[in-house]
Amino acid sequence: MTQDSQRYSDKRLADDFTIYVLFSEPLKGTVAEILEAVAEDYPGIDWSSSQIGGEIDTQGVTLSTDLGISKDEARGRTTFMGMPGRCELDWTPIFEMSRIVNPEAEQAVLRHTDHLSISVGSPQGNTSVAARFDAARRLTCLGAVFAKLPITLGVYFPSADLLVKPEDWVSAAETAMKGEVPVMQWMALYVNQFQWDGPAPEPVTVGTIGLAAFNGHELVMPQVQLPAGDAAHWIYMTVRMLLEAGHEFADGNTLGVEGQGKPIRIRLVAEGAETGGQTDQWFLFHEASLLDDEKVLGPRGGRPPPPGVDNSIMGDWDDLKNKLYSFVAGGR
């Protein structure tokens, strides 16, 4: 497959993770100083010394790359890159996406005078959850070192279209270091509302932006007549199930809590399908959804288990931790 014909779902898994750190005044330093700070604040993350360049200066052109060789094993490359001045992006949609988690996002952008871009990739060709999580965790810890500085105003994470508060980015690093997913910093949970003349609550569609960078899929709970917070909680917990507990979905599976209502029907919607998704998506059809999954998407895949057979899968909440241990130890 050529690069031009690569599916966007696959591209999301292959791309580096990137952040833009916004500062209220100029910053100078060296990559060595940054890596020393990361090693002190977040022990257990190793870094190589195979660096090209090493100076950081937000008032000039910054380009420094750690080639990603450690303990005789290849890992993702780390790159610091920046041009002098402000970070000039189309911030309007980012403000909208960030408004719940960071109401001060617009003020941070207005105040910033300097910025720095940092990227971390997973080892070439390795798109496993462990490799992707490790790359995102490394980047988050790097960003957290800067986020602790009093001149840092925010950390923009394009993978989720979020501008995160410095203190929340530090919290994300602490969560990731425990082998847990900082969902609210690594992914945006969007809520789309509909005109509705019926009984409350009004239907909403809730989904993720950013999950596809870890497993190639986004989540959508479509047109569900639930309070938005309840629908978002389902999405939040499903993200953690997929990434932390090792759950694997198939079209037609169900998801639920025993004894608590009808299970949610899981349907696979492929990239570019009629729903218009940019990536592959898992649609979660709750019993309160206004949509019938088979009318919208056709017959379900798979077959139901025979009567009396329990094929439920509970998952293992140590799954990601175990995969990370193997990955870091060299069992890639």
Image: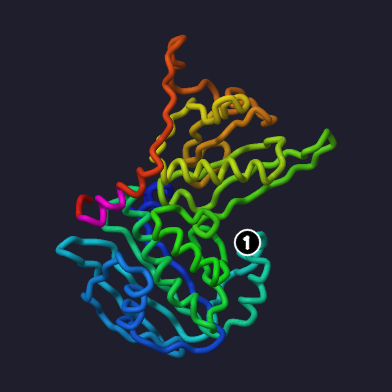
Q: Main secondary structure of the magenta part?
A: helix
> Magenta span covers which residues?
323-329
Q: Nearer the viewer, residue 47 or 126?
A: 47
Q: Is residue 149 magenta?
A: no
Q: Position of residue 22 (x, y in %)?
A: 53, 78
User: Which residue sits at x=25%, y=67%?
Assistant: 68
Q: Is residue 60 above or below residue 186?
A: below
Q: Nearer the viewer, residue 71 or 60?
A: 71
Q: Is residue 200 above or below residue 23?
A: above
- Amino acid type at circle 1 is Val
Q: Position of residue 273 (x, y in %)?
A: 52, 37
Task: Name the side, left or right, on which 94 lies relative to 132.
Answer: right
User: Which residue sits at x=25%, y=79%?
Assistant: 52
Task: Name the side, left or right, on which 120 lies relative to 275.
Answer: left
Q: Count of labels shown?
A: 1
Q: Nearer the viewer, residue 125 or 266?
A: 266
Q: Is residue 324 magenta?
A: yes
User: Which residue sits at x=50%, y=64%?
Assistant: 171
Q: Which residue is mark 1?
A: 101
* Element under disc 1: loop
Crowding near pointer 1: few (<14 within 10 Å), some, many (20+)?
some
Q: Position of residue 108 (x, y in %)?
A: 62, 76
Outermost residue toward the right?
197
Where, by quadrant of the figure, is residue 49 drawn? Answer: bottom left
Q: Is residue 56 above or below residue 329?
A: below
Where, by quadrant of the figure, is residue 221 drawn? Answer: top right
Q: Position of residue 267 (x, y in %)?
A: 51, 31
Task: Name the side, left or right, on which 204 lies relative to 109.
Answer: right
The colour mode here is rainbow
User: Which residue sits at x=38%, y=73%?
Assistant: 41
